[in-house]
Image (tube, grey):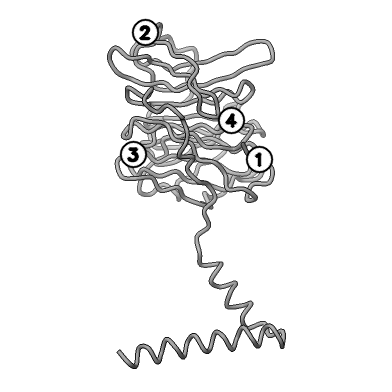
Amino acid sequence: MARLWVGLAGAGFFLALLVLHSRFCGSPVLRKFAFQVSWTTKEILYRLDVEWPNRPEYFTGTTFCVAIDSLSGLVYVAQRGDNIPKVLVFTEDGYFLRSWNYTVDTPHGIFAASTLHEQSVWITDVGSDFMILWLHGERGTGPAKFNIPHSVTVDSAGRVWVADRGNKRIQVFDKDTGEWLGAWNNCFTEEGPSSVRFTPDGKYVIVAQLNLSRVLLVAAPPVGSIGNCSVINTIQLADQVLPHLVDVSGKTGAIYVAEIGAKQVQKYVPVEGYFPSFTHS
């Protein structure tokens, strides 16, 4: 035990000498040491907003999906269950506004699109009859083939990103021609993506992995290239939270996660200063 204390004291004395030497002699030794410590420390880019929503008791079913209407500042949550409201409406600040349960049976996905003149909410209802308007691809593992295509989004360059969950990859297409542009699979060896969205500046892709209870922040590729998937940061949720679908606020960059295991929606906000192009609330 005496040797341990002597060793710790010696290490502390050595660091003190480095500080004094750097302070008075301008030595680069300490700066190099500090850089290495910072480089090996994993940065936290998003934090959980524990106060959203202010009335979580309105989550009374299994929350399958969430959609953000950034123009109106509204958050739509669709949930499944018997004798409950199927759609809940909150503000982005977390205040509950209203709900409804008519015309919706078994919601699976939701999308909000508004203009200055009207508000539109589109819901995928797997419990109702529907008609296929158009279809691209077929079941399989090759390019432009799918196994549980689970989420779709379009980037500012006109590329369509499809979370091909069963094949553990994201496939990318041209939105006008349908041409297959490439795929990401190197990030999804453990679990396929269940949801895909872009941050407002288009620099990052937000990807949810259902059974790993994980949300990834991935670097978006430049126009003209798909390349390989490169994970920048990870939000690891609690076990069995099961993030099903996510959406991102176009104003603040906040990530809203619909969790079918925890039966709630949680909000993650960007850490101040890391995403200077986002407007923080």
Residue at the disc numbered 2 = 129
Badge 2 or badge 4: first in the primary sequence? 2
The answer to which image quadrant residue 26 occupies is bottom right
Separation (CA) of disc 2 from disc 1: 40 Å
Which one is closest to the eye, mark 4 or mark 3?
3
Q: Secondary structure at mark 4?
A: strand
Separation (CA) of disc 4 from disc 3: 27 Å
Q: Would you say the residues marked 2 and 3 are in contact, meaning their CB atoms lie under 8 Å apart? A: no
Residue type at tag 1: Phe
Up/down of 110 relative to 167, above or below? above
Residue at the disc numbered 4 = 154
Residue type at tag 2: Asp
Which one is closest to the eye, mark 1 or mark 4?
1
Q: Secondary structure at mark 2?
A: loop
Which one is closest to the eye, mark 2 or mark 3?
3
Residue at the disc numbered 3 = 241
Badge 2 or badge 3: first in the primary sequence? 2
Q: Which residue is nearer to you in this view: 71 or 15?
A: 15
Badge 4 or badge 3: first in the primary sequence? 4
Q: Would you say the residues marked 1 and 4 are in contact, meaning their CB atoms lie under 8 Å apart? A: no
Q: Would you say the residues marked 2 and 4 are in contact, meaning their CB atoms lie under 8 Å apart? A: no
Q: How crowded is the residue under tag 4: few (<14 C-alpha within 10 Å), some, or many (20+)?
A: some
